[in-house]
Amino acid sequence: MKVVFIALLFFVFSNFIEAYEGMDVMHIVGKVLCQDCTQGWNEWVEGAKPIKGSIVSLTCLDERRRVMYYGSDLTDEAGIYDLIVNRTSCHGKTIKPQNCFVRLVSSPDSVCNIATDFAGGKSGVKLRRPAVVYRDLLKYVLSPFYYTTPMCDEPDISDNDDNLETNDDKHQNNY
């Protein structure tokens, strides 16, 4: 009984992979929102507003980690983007979704234009599992990306501050 079940599972999985590889077009869908920390807690958490005209990009790499596809899309009034990509690139190679990532590029909003890494919008999100695989439709639905206002932006206190010494630090002896 177990052998029959495993054989059936293998058959279904291999058919899924063949169908997945045979799809020529993929859709990557998501939303871009503005989250303003100057509002009250409820408005900050629940009140993110869509940004019309934001640019979101898709970059796909080949086996040697070279860019084989780059595309972008503008968001609509609801802040939604829908990147539609032909999976066969100009050189006849097939784009593998697991080698692609989506990220924020720009915001037209003069107040809400600082990209955040909440949900990976600033650094980029790799495509993992499609949300829909049905007939000729391969669709990835990503979590919303967020911009914020300059007032809400956290300062970058990375490695550059490690080497800073004040005059007091130079003359102190810790022993």
Image (cartoon, rainbow, N blue to C red):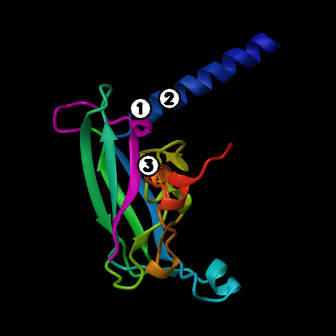
Q: Do the residues labelled 1 and 2 touch (CB within 8 Å)?
A: yes
Q: Say which quadrant the C terminus sits in.
A: top right
* Quarter where residue 99 is shown: top left
Instruction: Decide: few, some or many residues near mark 1? Use Cα within 10 Å; few <14, some 14-19, many ≥20.
Output: some
Q: Is residue 17 left or right of residue 107?
A: right
Which residue in the protein does label 2 denote? 17
Instruction: Decide: few, some or many residues near mark 2? Use Cα within 10 Å; few <14, some 14-19, many ≥20.
Output: few
Instruction: Report the front residue among 66 and 21.
Output: 66
Q: In this view, does 162 lie to the left or right of 67?
A: right
Amino acid carrying label 2: it is Ile
Instruction: Report the front residue among 57 and 130.
Output: 57
Amino acid carrying label 3: it is Leu
Which range of residues does the magenta coloring cover? 89-107
Q: Say which quadrant the N terminus sits in.
A: top right
Which residue in the protein does label 1 denote? 21
Which residue in the protein does label 3 denote? 137
Amino acid carrying label 1: it is Glu
Residue at x 68%, y 15% (from the top left corner): 7
Residue 31 percent location from the top left of the image: 47, 68
| Magenta segment includes 119 | no
Query: Of helix, strand and loop, which one carries label 2?
Result: helix
Q: In this view, does 72 lie above or below 106?
A: above
Residue at x 40%, y 47% (from the top left corner): 101
Q: In this view, does 81 lie above or below 84?
A: below
Query: Of helix, strand and loop, which one carries label 3?
Result: strand
Separation of marks 1 and 2 at Cα, in angstroms: 6 Å
Residue at x 69%, y 84% (from the top left corner): 41
| Magenta segment includes 100 | yes
Residue 173 percent location from the top left of the image: 61, 47
Instruction: Decide: few, some or many residues near mark 3? Use Cα within 10 Å; few <14, some 14-19, many ≥20.
Output: some
